[in-house]
Amino acid sequence: MTLEEFRRLPLPASEIIFENGVEGEPMYGIALIGHHVNLWADSEEFETTTSILGAPVDVKATPIEYRWTYDDGQYRTTPHAGEPRPDGVDPYEYKTHTSIVYEEAGNYDVALETVYAGYFRTGGSGWIPIPGVAVVASDPKVNSIWKTETRLVSEDCTENPDGWACESPFLKTPPWEQG
């Protein structure tokens, strides 16, 4: 099997998972400025059978590298897919292999490429490495980064329905609610 044949296979794209995803909105994560935002790749080894010159060939694709682009000028390449934080750690301070800290509020398109090493076998042979790699891009997702704002108020929303933050706790419309 050649590298070109390996790259033509329907290798799966990893899915970007946000630890603080927006419920019901799988394309969005939400977090605060200056805190670690944890995300990871849902990825696994892939096996398929194809035919080359009429003979069946088993092919295995193993993720060996993840290339993250966080849309704020930061990027990271890691052999780790990432993972959820352990229970009991401070979710804002605990750093993972794939977490990021954003310094500005905004919506950031997070991109991911998964790099696969390939192997093939025919008949009763063992796995034979395919020279080179295949790179598969994932669908980007949006990390919505917010800032907090504290104010002292002397009235509640019952006394003054037009008061600060009485209509909504958000001062802007989240991207998943925009038309």
Image (tube, rainbow, N blue to C red):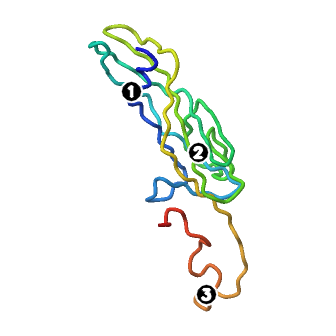
Q: Which residue is mark 1?
A: 9
Q: Nearer the viewer, residue 89 or 120?
A: 120
The residue shown at (47%, 13%) is 129
The residue positioned 58% from the left and 89% from the top of the image is 158
Image quadrant where one finds the N terminus: top left
Residue at (44%, 20%) from the top-left corner? 4
Q: How many numbered discs sit on the rendered protein?
A: 3
Give the labeled residue for mark 2.
Answer: 85
Eye-nearest disc, 1 or 3: 1
Q: Determine the CA span between mark 2 and mark 3.
A: 40 Å
Please name the residue that numbered disc 3 is placed on: 162
Disc 3 element:
loop
Residue 155 image point, x, y percent: 66, 88
Disc 1 versus disc 3: distance between alpha carbons? 59 Å
Which residue lies at the image location 46% right of the left edge and 18% below the top edge?
3
- Report the amino acid beneath label 1: Leu
Check whether the beta carbons of the residues at disc 1 and disc 3 lie within 8 A of each other.
Answer: no
Relative to 30, is 157 above or below? Answer: below
Question: Relative to 76, is 66 on the left or the right?
Answer: left
Q: Amino acid at mark 2?
A: Arg
Q: Earlier in the sequence, mark 1 or mark 3?
A: 1
Residue extending furthest left?
54
Q: Position of residue 159 (x, y in %)?
A: 61, 92
